[in-house]
Amino acid sequence: MIAGIIGATGYVGAELVRLLAGHPNIRSLALASVSFEGERMDYIYPNLFRRVRTLLIQADAVLEVAQVVFVALPSGVGESYAKRCMEKGIPCIDLSADFRFDDDEATFRAWYGKPFVYPELRNHSVYGLPELNREKIKALRASGPVIIGNPGCYPTAASLGAYPALALGLAGSGTIIVDAASGITGGGREPSRAFHYPECADALAPYKVGCHRHTPEISRNFTFMRTGDGKQREEGPSLIFTPHLAPMNRGILSTTYIPLSDAWQVKVPRTENPRPPVAEVMDQGAVIRSRYATFYRDEPFVRVLPAERIAATNRVRQSNYCDISIHLDQTGSTLIVVTAIDNMVKGAAGQAVQNMNIIFGFDESTGLSAIPAAF
Amino acid sequence: MIAGIIGATGYVGAELVRLLAGHPNIRSLALASVSFEGERMDYIYPNLFRRVRTLLIQADAVLEVAQVVFVALPSGVGESYAKRCMEKGIPCIDLSADFRFDDDEATFRAWYGKPFVYPELRNHSVYGLPELNREKIKALRASGPVIIGNPGCYPTAASLGAYPALALGLAGSGTIIVDAASGITGGGREPSRAFHYPECADALAPYKVGCHRHTPEISRNFTFMRTGDGKQREEGPSLIFTPHLAPMNRGILSTTYIPLSDAWQVKVPRTENPRPPVAEVMDQGAVIRSRYATFYRDEPFVRVLPAERIAATNRVRQSNYCDISIHLDQTGSTLIVVTAIDNMVKGAAGQAVQNMNIIFGFDESTGLSAIPAAF
Amino acid sequence: MIAGIIGATGYVGAELVRLLAGHPNIRSLALASVSFEGERMDYIYPNLFRRVRTLLIQADAVLEVAQVVFVALPSGVGESYAKRCMEKGIPCIDLSADFRFDDDEATFRAWYGKPFVYPELRNHSVYGLPELNREKIKALRASGPVIIGNPGCYPTAASLGAYPALALGLAGSGTIIVDAASGITGGGREPSRAFHYPECADALAPYKVGCHRHTPEISRNFTFMRTGDGKQREEGPSLIFTPHLAPMNRGILSTTYIPLSDAWQVKVPRTENPRPPVAEVMDQGAVIRSRYATFYRDEPFVRVLPAERIAATNRVRQSNYCDISIHLDQTGSTLIVVTAIDNMVKGAAGQAVQNMNIIFGFDESTGLSAIPAAF
Amino acid sequence: MIAGIIGATGYVGAELVRLLAGHPNIRSLALASVSFEGERMDYIYPNLFRRVRTLLIQADAVLEVAQVVFVALPSGVGESYAKRCMEKGIPCIDLSADFRFDDDEATFRAWYGKPFVYPELRNHSVYGLPELNREKIKALRASGPVIIGNPGCYPTAASLGAYPALALGLAGSGTIIVDAASGITGGGREPSRAFHYPECADALAPYKVGCHRHTPEISRNFTFMRTGDGKQREEGPSLIFTPHLAPMNRGILSTTYIPLSDAWQVKVPRTENPRPPVAEVMDQGAVIRSRYATFYRDEPFVRVLPAERIAATNRVRQSNYCDISIHLDQTGSTLIVVTAIDNMVKGAAGQAVQNMNIIFGFDESTGLSAIPAAF
């Protein structure tokens, strides 16, 4: 099979190339780049030297030969490629936000500042978080080509962390806070002051506080996960999402605070000053951890960690894993879920390949079985 | 004046040495170290070469000559030095947790696992967060020698961030969440797996989730700040505190979520999916920012940042500054305060020097006027 | 096939586990660890969670079941395992220095401070730099089990960089200087002050200047490469080797200065102050680069870079590649070869697997085909 | 005194601002920036918030009020400011390469690709390496205003490391190799791919091998140091200089290989493979170290380290120190000098302030007495 990538020389494109070049069902790659058309991929990315000699061509030429197309372009510029894929009957995996909101154009317009160009494409698109929508993807695929709205990096981490709590009724109605951090590759390949080495080395800070575009995507996922059908039947919990930039290349760490429903809270007697967690709190943590483990039992890429472990970005580096650790605050009222993914793999290119595997009926781990290194 | 440091070769001790060696009112240093007694300080710390040739001596000898004593030892082992300082009439600044809880031995015992050795010393001790207790420090000092319980690093950042919100009635009764991260010097000088370079480089993870010892210190501060006298008159807000380890040498970043009281909330009409912040939310942010700026107007080390800025650890590196930026979540219901300090300066040694300046009537900035470098 | 690793929980052991767990010809692993006997490998290394559940057992038990044994222990403690492998007829790949010096016990003793325990084992051992000794390895293997002395990390980088220059007569008789740097994983898993994060982050310094143990290994390789048979017929060039510690996890960068022989020097007229390189110097660089490319034409893991590129550690990260770039100094008298490898892969575990592939007649790239990531 | 900076918002400018704002003889700053004219300095550099509120003005306005002018602009664009300073009788410290070559326009033109604009200014200029030219600076200053050609960062480190060896006749006639690395601030404030965080984090590589512009500056210094008057009486040693980029913010580390003259070599009997250094080599190292210490005895900023220490960039961070450690290779024939400076302080802004202190007769350490931090 020939896989096409439009936008092959951005960071997400380059990561797709790395993963697809090692995928046993992909015979060759067709790579499009506006900036570097006519050059060899391994001259743009020296790490690929002698491994991916593919010439960078025009998007049109990619669409001619590919049996699956990945679009790794900024939001708003890729819809036309999805349209042409549909016309040709080729599955299209879009890594921008264009197809992440189903037919909710109002939300897309509010946060991305533009309308859907081809609203009708949403009849063929599905939000590609496999753990949530695997069956929907398969069903839609069964009826024709399909457009995958590949999830954002933060939404992947936050949503997988909250999913069992929402679906199993652990979460109460209080505000959920997602406090998360990303490695600097999340900013893409284009140099800018914010990602200039001396400005971000040895530094930590949030950005876009209260206004990051992944907020509505996370919130929508939470509603789906809680209600099963995405209809917000009652007034659901609010979401606060704060992204940070951390001095590391890869990784998303999401620390999510989920107020427990009454039934799930441990009633710890209030003292004037907090006390360390009592046994009942630890026990409740164990029960919830066990529910999480059961919930994700059959998922190939979600690892619910044992009690004594805490999820960390370096344990999933360069892999498609999503590590989750479960904790309770000392008062027993709030679930603290820590989630770690590699922002460029499970948070982008790896998840896109996972979606491709689902679409084509490959084993879902094909080409994604890299074991994360210890360092 | 001769300043004494007991525990001079730990990281906090070494930072005290650096600051005090440049302090115009300190004529010389008397330095005690159990591990390196008899060696020269600048042979243990090569950065100090030719600048601090002081011989490391026994604690007893330090107590003989010093006019002020800094104790930079683990919690529980320093009380006896404080006792001897009181007997000799010398002010003592203790950088452990031993004197951070006033006479609340129950809390100390619950979190630190041991009793007060000399409970009566609490008659002479005061919690040394100058922005909160400056007048108490001066008053106690007026009546004799004094023991300063120098605040923890996380409590300093979190408390200064929440103080105006609590004191001015902005905070409602909901749970306050302090999501914070520290640079790796916070772990001290002793090598261990957790702080071994390959284990923590290029990595981010929380630790001691739901059970870190700074939790009761932050909570106690919040209560004081809210009530003015530390008596918890009504059921106050709960606290959740989650520390993270970030791959950088210095800095504490605290992102604190404070649910606003009814009067301070902006009532944004609820939509199915969140909308970007409306003008009213931005305006309310500006008002709160202005209150913060006024509140801290006369503080030499607290910088409330203008609207377009976000506090970041690298902007305060090697300085005694506490930078604070003010944000609202998009629903207008929660105040998000971002606070950045250098964990080793305002979070430890610098604040200790600031306390010494207060005790001796020096200008509070003496020896602490370093301008943070841009990189 | 079952592969055994003795010393599985050190960093080299952990990297072997990662590579062998993904090797198609290895059915299972037998892992020995003194420190963690009885525990599960993926509890010691959380990155391996759910991927390598193998229980850590005693070395004896490993020797019972393995068809190939990797010994990842400090120099001097592993010889007895090699002996037992020979007795059982199992190939043994030793990653310490014990078998790197053939029968030159004098050199080993001078630098490692101990004698060979079983000198006779050297009848069965060969230095495992495949690019140099591939045929020797095969020949020895043909006659029975074999012990591989797996090369050191610095010697691998330096030797591959100098090999063509030495073998093709480009190098003159002047002193060769190898100025090299290693990532911090080179220091192993055991915490110590030198590798404590705050001591080595944001820092660069040499260590063991003029006395690093890899000096004689590099020097011996240079002699072999120059003379073909390891006999130093004439007074060969001296070697100076200076290792540095660089603030990164992985990688060896070696910048090697090789004075050219008279025939290969460009005679640039001497000016009072140096001039930028003239065309003749650039041309000579191109010729030498071409010789290097031809020399390594059939090597699967050596990449000679094109003219405009410089070898860099991050381009080979987590791969078995050795990238080489060729430069001349502006006077045309000295060849400057820059070599980059991943110290834990081509510099240790990857090369060991490459040796295993040779021994068992697998394609040399089996299990080693990972494409380095761009970031 | 009012100090003016032209080019105040580049990295060197910002570091000058930090140092001069804390200089006791500088009453105020006049800051020029083309890019940010009309803005407040502390809005461009948040670290300076509330400390340097100075408005950025035009260069002309700076020249009106300043009593000393620092020019922190790229080579070639600053000469006209130097000219105007001379006309006004104001000392000018130029941090570009324009005045580093005295009247040797041929060399400047060969490496910088342009002629001197005002060649006659060289009658008033002097190369500002205080340890070499302190008396020349004073003498020239005595006769009028003066232009300081402030040294480059690499040349400062390399030259101070080699100076005693050259001046005392330790160095023989062989090629001197300067293998050096810089932190990433050396690349300046302007974002570019080379200094984009994900491209240079966790990576090490040389750049401009054999063709870096600091080559002729280092070479010229070596000749001066050897001959005393800069006339190359005999054929002196060649220079090879290789710069590297290291993943850290600040620092230059220079490892310099100086072949010893016959009289200074230790004659170690040649063995087939190198032996560890014998006592005679260690002793000779001690003698040379002692000569270095004596040579630099009165220098306020040069620290010759004791035997067991090796110079490292993190030990001089944010200080004006140049740390030097002395080593011999195991054959006793080559001196290996390791030099560490902070590239932005002793390598740029700090040295410029040191020159200002000399020019105005201040104590040379004024404003430069910061003690480097341990971490």
Image (spheres, coloured by chain):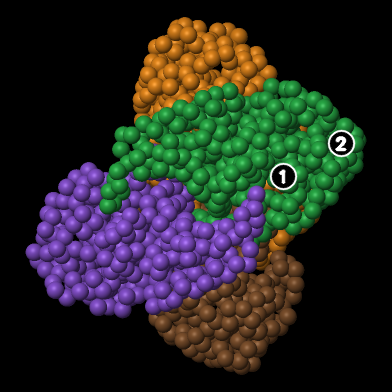
Chain colours: A brown, B orange, C purple, D green
Q: Which mark is residue D13?
A: none
| Image quadrant in which the N terminus of chain D is located | top right
Residue under numbered circle 1? D101
The answer to whether residue D233 is left or right of residue B64 is right
Image point 57% across, 73% down: which residue? Answer: A43
Which residue corresponds to the image point at 43% horizontal and 43% vertical from the top-left?
Answer: D334
**Chain of the residue displaying label 1:** D
Q: Amino acid at mark 2?
A: Met
Q: In the image, B5: left or right of D341?
A: left
Graded by Cα atoms within 10 Å as few (under 14), some (14 to 19) or many (20 or more), the crowding at tag 2 reads some
Q: Position of residue B343 (x, y in %)?
A: 54, 36
Disc 2 element: helix
Q: In the depicted view, which residue is nearer to us: C103 or A316?
A: C103
Q: Residue at x 58, y 78 (%)?
A: A40
Disc 1 and disc 2: Cα gap in Å?
18 Å
Q: Point out residue D372 in the picture as x, y percentages from the top left corner.
A: 56, 32
From the image, tell me which residue sits under label 2: D86
